[in-house]
Structures are given as structure tokens and as C-alpha cells.
Image (tube, rainbow, N blue to C red):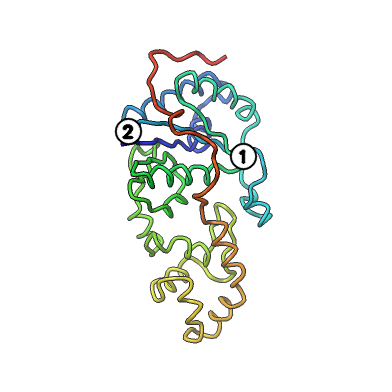
Amino acid sequence: MNRLLIIDGMNLVRRLYAAQPDEQDLAGLAQRTLNACHKLCAYHHPSHLAIVWDGEQESWRKKLYGDYKKGRKPMPPLLAQYLPQLKQALATAGMLSVNADAEADDVIATLACKVCQHAGEAIIVSTDKGFFQLQFKGLQQWDHFAQRWMDVASLEQKLGINRQQLLDFIALSGDSGNRIPGIPGIGPKSAAELLKSFRSLANIYHALDTLGHKQAEKLRSGYDMARLSYRLAKLQTDMTLNLNLSDYRWQPKEATAEPS
């Protein structure tokens, strides 16, 4: 059985970079990244490995909603300049990259979907909770920094919903981390209560006449924003990737080249 380890490249590297005391130590960053990837492979025993990176093109989400991810801290220039060398060092160690045109998330979701649909296993290495919306048989998510599987149950308990309701929850209350707006005046608590009562966004809108006037008006006037927010949060799983999984077979190498 194929087991694909999908590493969210920027999620891993930016956290490693932020944790190091000397931002100029790029060779040290490369070694820490290599060490992290080797540790991941030793623990998960993948048959295939792909490190997926964000690209520089404007994402379809940003085109759809200009404030998407607005205000997010940009990548440090030194790190941005070093990325090609870092990718080369990883490739020399047999860890190949997949470079997204824009956001890596949709590429990661598509890779996971394709492998699982062909009776394989996929392990996404990322702390991004947005991947919880993916519910394929054979898919798991690993937090490298906490050294544990991402816990869906704790998220469900924290938000007061089940994972099947995550996109509906974001459509109602938004996602501040990605600047997804949600419906003005509907916060996380209200969203959870509505979903507890009506189970889905569609059911809520079919039951507006049963709600209080104030809340019903917020939902009615915010309908278009809810649809937009749902679309922004939903990961694409059917992207055309033009790659062959066999090219990403994991074959450990005895030695790794020192990055220049």
C-alpha cells in the first residue's frame, strides 16, 4: 500500500526559522529542516514523500476576496531568498518538492484525496486546522512540533461542533486567522448554538422564520457573505497537478549534501 507523507513546507520551515536565535544561520536552518524530515520519515515509514510549498502567484481566494489573509506577517526576506537553496538541499537528500502556483493548501488537499481514493494512506504534516475538513479514509494529520496526531475531538469540543460542520461554522462566524469574514454579528458561540439546533447551514436558512427577529435579520442580510466565507474556507481536492506519484518514492540516502 502507498503511504504518502505530505509536508506543508512553509508551515514547517517558518516555525523552525522563527525558533532559531540567529536569523542569519541559514545553513543551520537547512540542517534542522533535514533533521525534521528524516525524523518524520523514520517515524511514519512513508513509501512516498512530497514537500509542498506556497507559490508567488495571487491565489483565487485573494482574487475573490481582497482582504483574504490581509495583515498576515510576510515571509522574512532572508528566508525567501534562501528557499531555492533549501529545496535543493532537500532534493539532494531525496526529499522532493511540489511547488504550488499560489497556496499550498489546495495542492496538499488534492494529493491527499488522490492517494486515499486509490486505497492508499496520506499523512499531512501541518498544524493548520483547516485540513480537518478533509475526511478521507486513510488520511491523518501530524503535528511535528507537538509530536502527536492532530486531535479532531479537542477541536470539536472547543468549538462546540462536529467536524462535518466545520465549513458551515466558518461560513457563519468567519476565521480571523485567514481574515474570512463570516456573517457580521454572528460569533463562534452563536454559530455553534445554531448548528447544534439545526445541524447545517442549509437547515438554518430554511428555518429563519423560527428564529428571533434580530438573529434572523443578521442571517438574512449576511447570506451572501456566508456563501463567500464557505467558499473561501473550502479546500479544493480536484486540482490538475501534472505529477507522477512514482517520482516521489522515498528512498533514504546515506549522506546529504551540505547546502551552499
Q: Which of these two is toward me, 96 or 74?
A: 96
Distance between the alpha carbons at the discs numbered 2 and 1: 28 Å
Q: Does 185 sit left or right of 161 as displayed? A: right
Q: How many marks overall?
A: 2
- Which mark is nearer the camera, 2 or 1? 1
For the residue pair 135 and 243, the one nearer the viewer reads as 243
Classify the position of the C terminus by image quarter.
top right
**Residue 47, how many percent across, how many down?**
35, 30
- Reply above or below: 5 against 209: above
Q: Residues within 10 Å of mark 1 (few under 14, many from 20)?
A: some
Q: Position of residue 152 (x, y in %)?
A: 35, 53
Q: Amino acid at mark 2?
A: His
* Residue 189, percent from left and from top: 45, 68
Q: Earlier in the sequence, mark 2 or mark 1?
A: 2
Q: Is residue 169 depicted above or below 214 in this figure?
A: above
- At a point 40% along the width and 42% down the height, the residue shown is 115
Check disc 2 and report the residue beneath it.
44
| Side of 170 relative to 24 (left or right) | left
* Residue 81, quarter of picture: top right
Instruction: Identify the residue at image location x=30%, y=36%.
Output: 1
Q: Amino acid at mark 1?
A: Asp
Q: Are marks 2 and 1 in contact (CB under 8 Å)?
A: no
* Label 1: which secondary element: loop
10 Å crowding of disc 2: few (<14), some (14-19), many (20+): some
Which residue does the numbered mark 1 point to in the structure image?
A: 101
> Is 57 left or right of 132, judged from the image as shown?
right
The answer to whether residue 57 is above or below residue 19 is: below
Res. 196 mark: none
Mark 2 secondary-structure assignment: helix
